[in-house]
């Protein structure tokens, strides 16, 4: 997987980029701009990921990669936490309009914003919150391959733990423009492809699932 791969940039990600750019212009820094139904549901995911911070020392600080950061909702949720005082945050997004909104809303020296669909900086934690859900009716097999390649790349930039969430195939409600992953299949994928301990978090089932992958030396 390369940063300039036309399959990802044009066939799959360009429709997503256009959709999010239009949404943030319409809604601004609100959950609807990143296809979340409301702020409460959005914050619940951030809380689940934040449980991993116990694996790092808040005194020495740590670095968080957030792929698909949108207008910076994750950083806004974390920036006031005591354990985040000495942390650094790197938000990645494919939409320049989203990043512009994030910079405007969150002028914090701890935050860096990068236009990219991959992680370019090594971090202690890498989080993907909702980024894999909107696929704009892309071919499901191609999207799954993209997600798997993307997860491999993110793992290569992660020192402590990787966390991501996805809509589940077990969800009672389905929409054509959204991708629904199989939690068991992605659990097996992470177990086989990553040299870490894999945890399937079912706190959001049946609609969604969260997977953590923790490097063995941090257990």
Image (cartoon, grey):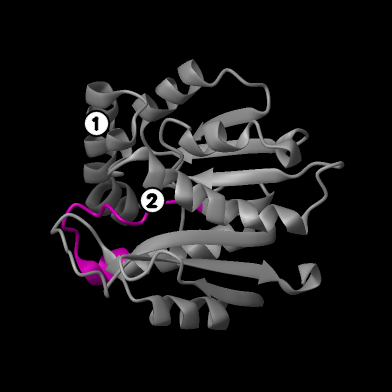
Q: Mark 2 points at which residue?
A: 131
In the rendering, at what x and y percent does residue 189 appear?
48, 79
**Does residue 155 show up magenta in the picture?**
no
Image-quadrant location for residue 1: bottom left
Q: Earlier in the sequence, mark 1 or mark 2?
A: 1
Image-quadrant location for residue 193: bottom right
**Mark 1 crowdedness (10 Å alpha carbons): few <14, some 14-19, many ≥20:** some
Tell me the CA gap for discs 1 and 2: 15 Å
Q: Image point 29% across, 48% down: which residue? A: 13
Compared across the picture, whether 97 is left or right of 219 comes to: left
Q: Image point 29% across, 39% down: which residue? A: 17
Depth check, front residue: 117 or 83:
83
In the rendering, at what x and y percent does residue 121 appear?
64, 44
Part of the protein shown in magenta: 128-143
Q: Mark 1 points at which residue?
A: 23
Quadrant assignment for the C terminus: bottom right
- Circle 2 — which element? loop
């Amino acid at each position: 997987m390369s940063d300039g791969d036309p399959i990802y940039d044009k066939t799959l990600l360009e429709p997503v980029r256009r959709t999010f750019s239009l949404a943030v212009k319409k809604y601004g820094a609100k959950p609807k701009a990143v296809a979340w139904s409301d702020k409460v549901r959005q914050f619940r995911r951030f809380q689940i990921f934040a449980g991993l911070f116990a694996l790092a020392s808040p005194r020495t600080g740590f670095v968080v990669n957030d792929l698909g950061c949108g207008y910076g909702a994750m950083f806004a949720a974390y920036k006031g936490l005591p354990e985040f005082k000495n942390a650094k945050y790197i938000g990645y997004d494919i939409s320049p309009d989203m990043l512009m909104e994030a910079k405007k809303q969150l002028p914090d020296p701890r935050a860096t914003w990068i236009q990219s669909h991959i992680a370019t900086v090594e971090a202690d934690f890498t989080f993907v919150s909702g980024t894999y859900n909107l696929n704009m009716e892309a071919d499901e097999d191609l999207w799954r391959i993209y997600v798997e390649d993307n997860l491999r790349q993110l793992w290569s930039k992660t020192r402590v733990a990787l966390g991501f969430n996805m809509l589940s195939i077990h969800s009672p409600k389905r929409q054509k423009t959204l991708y629904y992953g199989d939690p068991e299949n992605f659990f097996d994928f992470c177990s086989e492809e990553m040299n870490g301990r894999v945890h399937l978090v079912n706190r959001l089932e049946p609609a969604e699932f969260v997977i953590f992958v923790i490097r063995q030396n941090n257990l």
